[in-house]
Image (cartoon, coloured by chain):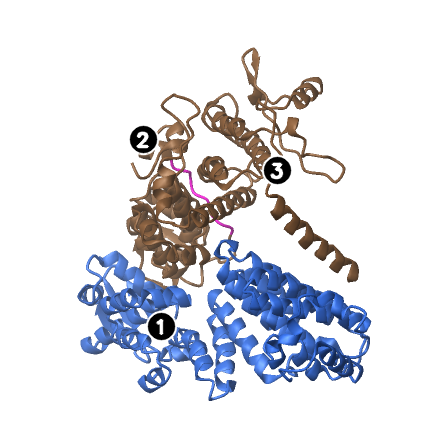
Chain colours: A blue, B brown
Amino acid sequence: MSATGSLNQYIQLIERMYRTSQGNFLSRLLSLRDEHVGNRNLRSSDIATLVEGNCVAPLDEIVISHLLCVKSLYLRDYMEAFEHQSACVACVVKLLQNQKEVNWGLPVMYTVCLDLRLVAQKAEATYLQSNGKILEKAAESLLACFRVCAADNRSSDADTKRLGMLTLVNQLLKVYFRINKLHLCKPLIRAIDSSPFKDQFPLAQQITYRYFVGRKAMFDSDYRSADDYLSFAFHNCHKQSIKNKRLILTYLVPVKMLLGFMPSIQLLQKYDLMQFWDLVSAVKKGDLRGIDQVMEEHESFFISAGIYLIVEKLKITAYRNLFRKVYLAENSHQIEIASFQAALQLMGHDDVDADETQCIVANLIYDGKIKGYISYQHKKVVVSKQNAFPPLSSLY
Amino acid sequence: MSSYFDYFCQNIENETREKSTQNVDRILGTCYSMCPEDEVKLREAERLVHLLEVWGSERRLVKSYSRSAADSNMAVPHLLRPYSVLANTVQYLLLDVTRRVDVPESIMYDFVNDRLRAVRQDITIQRLIPTQCVCLLEPMIRFYVYYGYVLSAHPLKDYDPVLNKKYLLECLKWYLTCCDSIAKEKGNIDELSGFFSGLELNIRESKSKLVNDQALVESLYILCNLDDLHPLYRYLKMTKDLKRQEKLELSYEIAIANLQGNYVKVCRLSEKLCPLLYCALCTYLPTLQRRALNVTCHAYNNKRLTVPSTALVRWLCFTTERDANTVCSHYGLKVNGDAVQFDRSEFKTDAHLHIPVIRNIRKKFDVSLIDIFTYETSK
């Protein structure tokens, strides 16, 4: 909207959009990321008295808190801005509640909620001692919106506010991941998964949703579903959103690797994820020392992405690959435990003994990664004549 | 809906108001004995004095736990004990009461547990500052870890492992949250270890006193939750100083070995643990053994071949060959003399967890009960 014009013009415009139920236009007029924010006329010293009585009932409070928030942002007082934006969201909640049987107000809710999260993040970054408290408060406000949407089950399918649930859930997921409260995601995920509109939500929202749910599945060690969610996100993500695709791949690559699919060097180069390349080659070779080196070199990247423990688990794949090499070199169906042990020692597990080697083999057999059995008496592993090392990708 | 929203708004308002007045409405206890006068009178009259509160002719009552109810006001200063009294109470419960041998251990556990809950309740109501909380919680964590193992073979009517785990986790998480906020306040986590080493409860001048050992608690958090990844995520995000602490590094290594199913390594490394960490691991041992036996059943699956029990003793920390054989037959495996035949179709996956005979921790490490509650890992 225009960056000039008087406060009265601005109010009239908002009222007109409201009367004509133009949610998208109204949302822009109440956004913190719109041109009108730069308009000096809207930053007068006494907004409350100027607006009051000059604007129809449910809108006045919204406009006041919105403009107060803008003012605080210009004064760089992010805490104050956050309070005003919270008030703004609260007023929008009341507005939506009173709009029965229609959902044209949803875009307004999306905008004020997104702005609330952004302001909260800004405040969080400014007041470090708050330690997630501001974002937690923002989440409370978002939840109030979510409840209004989720509870709207009387309206027809086209007009129900339940269509707005996913956008809110995504905002909440972003907050919860940022403040590391993943356990709070569960009820939200359940609400979306059981929603009849599950597949009707906008694609962009579905992608965001699956990106977060996939990450959560990864943290919960549920790699099959993590693969499903993240793959969906990756394949449907717009091809020009390189940054987002890279983010998705940061998690999809290690998950895929665990499931036995190694990424190509072209893919990793394209998305600037070469940290994984050394890892891929080390795992392929069964080079345990190499894996340790990669982990040390890229420690902070792996830890901050939360995939360090997955990399630890990739060592099991490396064992399998190493033992397969021994098996191919020995060219026999009966392999001495001592040969496996020597291979482990050669590759960096210096202190491994026969007992531990057997334990590692035992786990691989249990997981179905080696077909065969161990003979304790003969100190040998007897592997199947056919398909002794089935491809990992066939196991899951 | 709207009423809830009003309630929510009011909450926010109240909170902001609270912040501006900064702790003015914090309640300070004025009860300077371990048990408030009122409760002493009531319990004496109603004959509710616990056997463990009677010391010869003397009676030493300790405030007992009572659930907060809607109609009762618990925030009364003369019913609440200030920090110094709470610290004395914890010390008394752990260092004196636990030494009583005239009552069964499970009864003593119930008594101390109840009184410790009352202490935690007092902490909560008075909203003590984190630096005080950690000093009170650390000994409690030791208590729950130690007795969690010692009592693990007791029947359910005497001791409930689930409840013990619940209290243990409550204390652990509370403690760790306090550590985090202390670190935040300090603004520099590296100073934390130095800060903590100077923080001891100097209540008695005797040689045994309670201490606060953050590395020990962080290690316990890992080893008491071996099937959970969150303690490991926490470990990875720690500062280098803390990470490098020997006990903590070892606990992480054990957890990773367990994650990879490497039971041989877990058992081998467990020999290097200090008494309490060893307790934590031993409590987990039956679970580890069951899973490992299931794995070996698949790996050594053969109708003719066997695995000698001595190998199992080596791999899985069994105390004796007989112990190993009992556990194997409990899970449905055939035992021929001194060897076990692994047949994966025989393994009973639905058999309840077999809890082996409890080993004597104090004898193994040659430490007294007081040592268990007071030793420091850094020394």
Q: Is B359 included in the stretch rendered in magenta? A: yes
Q: CA distance from mark 1 to mark 3?
A: 60 Å
Visible in this render: residue B372?
yes
Q: Amino acid at mark 1?
A: Lys
For the point 44% across and 80% down, the residue is A243
The kind of residue tagged 3 is Arg
Give the labeled residue for mark 2.
Answer: B366
The answer to whether tags 1 and 2 share a subunit is no
Please identify the quarter of the rendering in which residue A41 is found. Answer: bottom right
The residue closer to the viewer here, A290 or A375, is A290
- The residue singled out by tag 1 in the image is A369
Quadrant in the picture for residue A55: bottom right
Q: Which residues are magenta?
A: B352-360
Which numbered disc covers residue B344?
none
Q: What is the chief secondary structure element of the magenta stretch?
A: loop
Give the number of the disc on residue B26: 3
Query: Label 1 to label 2, Cα distance in Å?
Result: 44 Å
The 10 Å Cα crowd at callout 1, few under 14, some 14 to 19, many 20 or more, is: many
Mark positioned earlier in the residue sequence (2 or 3): 3
Marks 2 and 3 belong to one chain:
yes
Using the image, determine if residue B250 lies above or below residue A392.
above
Give the percent coordinates (x, y) of residue B337. Answer: 33, 48
Instruction: Determine the CA span between mark 2 and mark 3.
Output: 45 Å
Residue at horizontal 32 percent and vertical 54 percent from the top: B240
From the top left corner, tell me how far across and down residue B298 is, in percent.
Answer: 38, 64
Label 3, residues with CA under 10 Å away: few <14, some 14-19, many ≥20: few
